[in-house]
Structure formats: C-alpha cells, structure tokens
Image (spheres, rainbow, N blue to C red):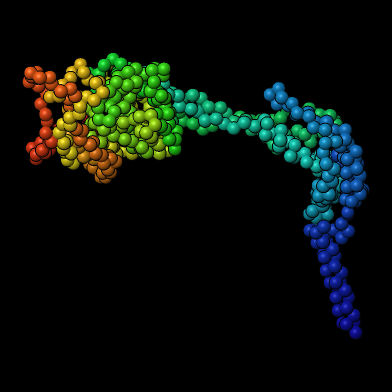
C-alpha cells in the first residue's frame, strides 16, 4: 500500500513539473498566454496618443485627426526657380491607415515574454512616435506628384558629332546634356517629415543629374573615309565648272541619317539662272545644246560613283543618251528635272557624311561613315558588251529657211551633226576581302543608242545656167562593225575601272 501511494506521489510530481515546463516554454519562447491587443503606454501615431487603445480605436481617432487636417494642408514644391502648389482640398478622401496602424501595434510583440517586457518598458520610458504618411488619406496625391515630376525631369541628350567639311579638323564632338531625375523616395520622406510639423509646407524637390556614358574618342573612331571619287573638267568652260561646283556645294557638309532617302534634284534645286546656274552645254536628244545648269550631271555622276564605293544603296539612276567623257560606260548618272534623278538611301547603321567640292580642274566627292570590316573593300568594274552601229547620215531639206546662211539650193549641204555609234555595257560592284573578289553584283545594264548623222540641204532649184561648187560635206554610210573596232572600244572602256578612272 505504501508502495502504491509513493508511485502516485511520484506521478503527480512529474505532471506538475511537465506543466511548469510547458508554461515556461510558452512564456519564454512563445507569445505569452494572454497576448495584449492594445498599444503600449506612451505610444503616439501622428501626434495622437494611442496608449491602451485597440487597433480599431486607434484607426478611428488617427484617421479622424488626419482628415481634419486635410483641408488645411498646403504643399508648395519648388525646383530651379519653378514652383507648384497643392492643396489638401484638391485631393479625394482616402482612408487606408489600417495596415500601418496594425504594424505599429505589432511592434515588440514577437519573441519571448522577457524580450517583449523589455521593449514595453523602453516604450513607456522613451515613447514610441510613429508617423503615417499623408498619402494614406490624400487620394490621388501620387498622380499629382508624378505630373509635377514629369515637368522637372529631363532626358539625357547624347553628344553630337559636328561635321565641318571645310575645316582642317572635319569632325568634333559637341557635348550632350545630363538627365535630371527626381529622387522619389527622398521627396516622400521630406513631405512626410514636413507635414508632421506644419500644415503649410514648402519643399525643394530633390534631384540628381545622370551623366550619359560616352567615350568621345570611340565615337570619332567610328567615322572614317569610306570612299572618294574624282572626275576631271579641266577642259570645260568656266560657266560649266561653276555649275558643277554649285551642285556639289549643295551636298557639301550634308549628313544623311541611317534609313534616310535623298534626291539629288531636291537637294540641288531648280537648274535656273535665277537659282544661280549658268548656261553651258547639255545633252538633249543625243545633241549638245546650250542650257542652264549644263555640267550638273558631272556632279551627280561623281557623287554616284562615290556612293557605290561606299556601299550606299542607290535607288534610282539613269545614263545619258551619249556616253560621258569623264567616266566609263554604265557609270554615269544623268539628272534632269522632271524625268531623271539620282536617289539613294543610307542603309548603314549610322549616319554618313558627305564632303563635295570642285577645284580648278576636278570634281571631288568624299563619303565618311562607319569603317568597313577589317580586310573588306569595294571596287567597281565596267564591261563593254558590244557596239550598236549607227545608220549613217540622214538628209533633210531646209523647208523653213532656218539654215539659209549655209544652204539655199538643192545640192548644197551643211552638216548639223555627225553620226555616233552606240554601245551596250554593264556596270558591276565588286566586294573584296584581303584584296580578293568574293562577290560581284551587276548594278547597271545600259544601251547608249546610236545617233544618226544629220545633213541639211537647200530647197531652192538652181536657175538656168547655174552650177554649184563642189561640196565639202561627205555623206557617211551606215556603220559596219568589225571585230577590230569592237576590240578597240573594249580596250578603251575596260582599260581602267571607274574606281580608278581619272581622264
């Protein structure tokens, strides 16, 4: 019996110890048996004492105080001499302080009972002062602040390449502009701190400058001479030289953006005396005649060949009715207002820069832009196909008396023009790697049609007993093409490629 009683006492002792350990662990490691749902003594939210209040009670009092203050709020934001005003009455009524109040209530509530007690005593002694942002009661303030920020912030402006084709140093870099950005976190902090102290506040918008990353030297290294081409006008008249120089000057210093299309006619403008062009020979219907702007085609041709060598896409080009003396066949570029133009497009990833000018003897075009890949280059090649034979002279009578200074009677002849043979030809662009042709592309297939000779004869009949002196005009028959003549033309045309041509 004594043994049984001893066992019961032992079990009771063990049970008491177990319950004690359980309670100790719950108090020490858990949240306590009776978790408080009220704020610590000496706790203030937005200046309101919420000691001993529940979360719901504190929410009602604090939100009421904040909403009372709402209509009295006046916020002035300034930046670089500009200012913007916001009034509390402009905002919608908003109440979203339940979550931040709950977070204040949870302060110091985790951990064991001793840690929580320590924090509670600290709050009682030193106080807990928390400020809930007025954004929680001023509905729409974020949007209004963003509207103001949009007026303050600026984007960075990248540095620009300055192109001065007539200067010794043609390329330089113009500094860009830094971006101006608003520090939104600092602005919100300054706003909340100011509204704790007063209803009417003035705040300087905090900004920072963001410097764009740019390596000027690297930018300039991306610009190099891609191509150059020259044609000679050494034997031309001064008026013709003037026209070539004027047309080239319209392109001198021109920057063509990536993807931009350019029309030669649009850039050079009307070929009129009023526009500064002079009268010189032009080719019209296979005949050289005087006209304003004579020589402009040499400017377009020089530009055309430089474009091909720079690997710039040519969208439209035309050949003359007669071969040009300053370039091989299939590498001339005739322009005429209304029906013939030189049109090109910059298909590179960056701009191209054009330097174009004429000196006393030569027309020059240089094109600058991104470098070719290492070892790669471009050449052009002219190919003579065959002679297109002319059909000799044609004789017409001077029915309207236009040539009475030369001819009056039948049998009297005056040559208006000589017959000219025509040519079929092709033009190619060659792509080279380390000096070897890896691709060849035909860019032109042209027919310079033959021209008949033209002789005018008088229309009057000879009177009785009249005789005419022997005529020095020799009639030229239709051309007979020989293999020797074709070989002669072929050698002349293909002796030099257009990229080497310099007559």
Q: Along the line of sight, which residue is nearer the eye, 350 or 239?
A: 239
- Left or right position of 136 against 343: right
Where residue 401 sits: x, y (%)? 24, 21
What residue lies at 74% left-to-right and 40% top-to-bottom?
Answer: 142
Q: Along the line of sight, which residue is nearer the eye, 496 or 266?
A: 266
Query: In the rendered view of the protein, which quadrant contains the N terminus?
Result: bottom right
The vertical placement of 181 against 61, above or below, is above
What residue lies at 88% left-to-right and 74% top-to-bottom?
Answer: 12
The furthest residue to the bottom: 1
Query: In the rendered view of the protein, which quadrant contains the C terminus?
Result: top left
Q: Along the line of sight, which residue is nearer the eye, 205 or 384?
A: 384
Is any part of residue 210 visible from this angle? no
Q: Along the line of sight, which residue is nearer the eye, 452 or 137?
A: 452
What residue lies at 11% left-to-right and 39% top-to-bottom?
Answer: 481
Where residue 262 sits: x, y (%)? 42, 32
- Left or right position of 52 against 183: right
Where residue 361 sits: x, y (%)? 25, 18
Number of labels in the image equals 0
Where residue 431 sits: x, y (%)? 27, 41
What residue lies at 33% left-to-right and 24% top-to-bottom?
Answer: 296
- Left or right position of 152 against 131: left
Determine the image quadrant of residue 368: top left
- Left or right position of 27 against 81: right
Determine the image quadrant of residue 130: top right
């Amino acid at each position: 019996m004594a043994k049984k009683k001893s066992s019961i006492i032992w079990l009771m002792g063990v049970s008491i110890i177990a319950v004690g350990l359980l309670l100790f662990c719950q108090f020490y490691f858990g949240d306590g048996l009776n978790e408080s749902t009220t704020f610590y003594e000496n706790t203030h939210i937005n200046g309101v004492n919420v000691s001993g209040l529940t979360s719901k009670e504190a929410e009602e009092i604090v939100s009421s105080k904040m909403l009372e203050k709402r209509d009295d709020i006046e916020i002035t934001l300034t930046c670089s001499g500009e200012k913007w005003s916001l009034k509390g009455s402009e905002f919608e009524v908003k109440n979203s302080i339940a979550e931040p109040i709950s977070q204040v209530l949870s302060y110091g509530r985790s951990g064991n009972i001793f840690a929580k007690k320590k924090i509670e005593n600290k709050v009682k002694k030193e106080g807990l002062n928390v400020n809930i942002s007025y954004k929680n009661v001023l509905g729409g303030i974020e949007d209004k602040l963003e509207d103001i920020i949009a007026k303050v912030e600026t984007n960075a402006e990248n540095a620009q390449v300055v192109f001065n084709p007539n200067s010794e140093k043609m390329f330089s870099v113009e500094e860009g502009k830094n971006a101006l950005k608003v520090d939104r976190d600092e602005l919100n902090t300054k706003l909340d701190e100011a509204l704790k102290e007063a209803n009417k506040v003035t705040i300087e918008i905090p900004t920072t400058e963001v410097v764009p990353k740019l390596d000027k030297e690297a930018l300039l290294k991306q610009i190099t001479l891609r191509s150059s081409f020259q044609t000679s006008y050494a034997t031309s008249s001064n008026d013709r030289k003037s026209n070539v120089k004027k047309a080239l000057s319209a392109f001198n210093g021109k920057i063509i953006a990536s993807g931009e299309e350019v029309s030669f006619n649009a850039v050079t403008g009307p070929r009129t005396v009023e526009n500064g062009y002079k009268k010189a020979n032009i080719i019209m219907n296979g005949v050289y005649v005087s006209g304003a702007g004579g020589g402009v085609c040499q400017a377009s041709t020089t530009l055309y060949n430089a474009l091909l060598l720079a690997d710039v896409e040519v969208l439209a080009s035309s050949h003359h009715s007669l071969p040009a003396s300053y370039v091989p066949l299939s590498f001339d570029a005739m322009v005429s207002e209304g029906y013939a133009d030189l049109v090109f497009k910059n298909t590179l990833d960056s701009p191209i820069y054009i330097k174009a000018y004429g000196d006393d003897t030569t027309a020059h075009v240089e094109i600058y832009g991104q470098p070719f890949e290492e070892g790669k280059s471009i050449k052009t090649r002219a190919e003579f196909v065959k002679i297109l034979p002319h059909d000799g002279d044609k004789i017409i009578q001077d029915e309207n008396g236009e040539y009475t200074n030369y001819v009056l009677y039948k049998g009297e002849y005056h040559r208006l023009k000589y017959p000219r043979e025509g040519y079929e030809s092709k033009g190619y662009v060659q792509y080279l790697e380390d000096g070897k042709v890896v691709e060849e592309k035909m860019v032109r297939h042209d027919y310079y049609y033959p021209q008949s000779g033209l002789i005018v004869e008088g229309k009057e009949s000879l009177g009785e007993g009249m005789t005419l002196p022997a005529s020095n005009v020799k009639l030229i028959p239709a051309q007979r093409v020989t293999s020797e003549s074709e070989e002669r033309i072929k050698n002349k045309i293909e002796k030099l490629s257009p990229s080497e041509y310099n007559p």
